[in-house]
Amino acid sequence: MTDPLLDAVDLVKTFPGGVRAVDSVSLTVARGETVGLVGESGCGKSTTAKLLLRLLAPDSGTVRFDGADLAAARGRRLRELRRRLQVVPQNPGTSLNPRLTVRRSIEFNLRVHGFPRDGRRRLVSELMDRVGLAGRHADAFPHELSGGQLQRAAIARALATGPDLVVCDEAVSALDKSVQAHVLNLLAELQRDLGVAYLFISHDLSVVEHISDRVVVMYLGRVVEEGDASDIWGAPAHPYTRTLLSAAPGEGRQRIRLQGDPPNPAAPPPGCSFHTRCPDAFDRCGTERPTLLTVGRAHNAACWATATPTRTRTQPQTAAAAADRKAVTAP
């Protein structure tokens, strides 16, 4: 692979009380690629996003965007990098200024990044048309829009500066399924037209399946599996990934029910952090923490059980299913 657009290496973030929200997380995003970052609530997904966006400073580790060290960037250079690295938040109803109209919210992003005054209104109109908002919405306030319209406005604001990468943090979790489908199709269409890359963060596996090229799975602050989306869905290697997939609607898998409660993030268990709930755990799992092991081409999992011949896998996706993966149909 050519040099990635985003390259994060060994990110660590610990909060007061000893809670290590992010523990040696590494991930990459290529140009024009969609990487899904998944895991249950509290696993560290959003904290990872804030580290990648430099909204939080890591305790250790590096984030490079297009070859530049984000932590070292200052002044004009940092502003230029942030222009190319934008975010669509989980709840646009609270991220959009309630006192600004949709047009002014989008235009504000352009003004902050120094876009010439002449042409800003024209660009905002083009963006709103591209994301499917009618002209009458330009002068509406956030409280006058539906959830889907608010999210389209947030997407337009993120795209206003012409970014190379957009971090979508639970961008459709607050929407009903039919609206989710429309927004996901919009994101896929914009990616085809503009070549923008996405880091798509979600706890909803069915959403991530449709939009992602690659998937990174997190548990208790660590990456436990990563690989092409077709590999993750067709042949999940980590027991936690298989558990998540078994709970996704429409997967046709036998539901896996875990025993016990998730560990205390301030006092994680020794060895593999998942071993206290894992149906495949054996002695080594409780004493030695696994690193990411190669289980296939560009497919890695942090699980000692992946080396055992008794591990079962689901059948791989068919070629037709893989080709249709990104087509989302509204119910």
Image (cartoon, rainbow, N blue to C red):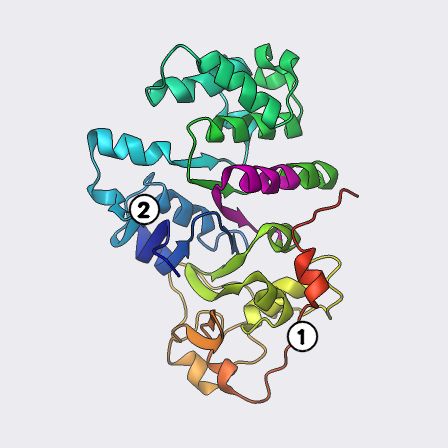
Q: Residue at x 30, y 32 (%)?
A: 80
Residue indicated by mark 1: 314
Toward the viewer: 98 or 8? 8
The residue furthest bottom is 309
Q: Disc 2 residue type?
A: Asp
Up/down of 131 relative to 97, above or below:
below
Left or right: where does residue 47 sit relative to residue 307?
left
Q: Residue at x 47, y 64 (%)?
A: 263
Q: Quadrant of the C terminus?
A: top right
Residue 39 appears in the picture as rendered = no
Across and down, in percent, residue 228 comes to 53, 63
Left or right: where does residue 243 sit relative to residue 15?
right
Across and down, in percent, residue 83 comes to 36, 31
Across and down, in percent, residue 132 comes to 65, 26
Q: Residues within 10 Å of mark 1 (few under 14, many from 20)?
A: few
Q: Disc 1 residue type?
A: Thr
**Callout 1 secondary element:** loop
**Callout 2 secondary element:** loop
Q: Which residues are magenta?
A: 184-204
Left or right: where does residue 102 sit relative to residue 119?
right
Residue indicated by mark 2: 66
